[in-house]
Amino acid sequence: MRPDPGYAARVTIGEHIAHEMYVAGVRAWPEVRVEWSTFREHIARAPRGKPNPDLMRYAADLYLCCACAAKDDAARAIVVRDGARSVRRAIARVGRDPAFVRDTLEGFWSQLLSGPDPQIERYSGRGSLRAWLRVIASRVALERCRAQRRSAEREASPAQHFVGARLGPMVPIRRGAYESAFQDALERAIDDLPSADRNLLRLHVRRCGVDEIGRIYNVQAATAARWLERATGRVLVAAQQRLAPTSAMPSRASCLN
């Protein structure tokens, strides 16, 4: 049976040492108010892993985080004030775009200090609070980058290209009623295409015109255009067949107009 994460903390932090840590926090942050019982419970819950040989070194940081977890406004203001510059730098190392930094900062502070399970509760006192904030900020920024990349990849998919295009006068109307089924049918239809046709559609979605596609395949632009129209027609016909039980899509002819 595996011990729970707080086991080491409860065993290694005795009442006397815990109280010394509490006093250190009170002295470091006189403007912050935390009850002794609240602090004692907090450090007993903190995920600590291996026993920390230097518990007192970051006692004031633990006290501050305990106050933040207890919704103390003064403590939150101190953490934001003291950590703002290093957190911003950590995020900017991942992505320098000002909008990215701004939005990631907003999400970071919200995750750290708000909600029923604020991330500040996970600070264990095994390193400085400022360094810990940098690590968490970097993780939030990296995850945001990955999410943006996944979103961009979805938007660049052939199916998303079809969803975003005006394929005929009736498609947008029917798509509004059956958007999820519409996209699913397109994705399945594209998956069923021969690999050569799928590659053509991917090139087209990446803004390759028929002249460029022709050069890639060493054919005339008119030939590339016919290939592309054929692949598009196959997708629309297959999608129409898949959606037939749900919604009557326009015919291939009307879609290609």
Image (cartoon, rainbow, N blue to C red):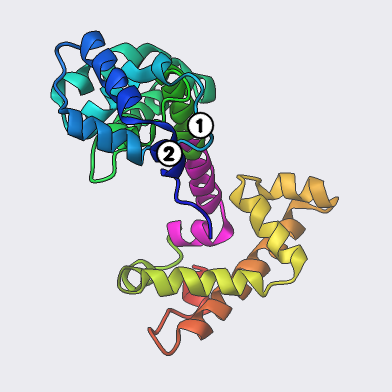
Return the residue at label 2.
11
Residue at 34 percent across and 41 percent down: it is 45
Residue at 80 percent across and 45 percent down: it is 215
Q: Is residue 124 at least partly visible in the picture?
A: yes
Q: Secondary structure at mark 1?
A: loop
Locate residue 14: give its quadrant: top left
Return the residue at label 1.
51
Does 33 sit left or right of 233 as displayed? left
Locate residue 229: give its quadrant: bottom right
Specify the segment rendered in magenta: 144-164
Q: Is residue 45 above or below residue 80?
A: below
The amino acid type, in three-letter code, at marker 2 is Val
Task: Tell which tag, 2 or 1, sits nearer the viewer.
Answer: 2
Residue at 26 percent across and 38 percent down: it is 41
Total number of numbered discs in the rendering:
2
Report if residue 162 lies within the magenta region.
yes
Percent from the top left, x then y, of residue 179? Answer: 37, 69
Percent from the top left, x then y, of residue 97? Answer: 45, 22
Does 13 sit left or right of 114 as displayed? right
Are the two marked residues, 2 and 1, in contact with CB atoms closer than 8 angstroms? yes
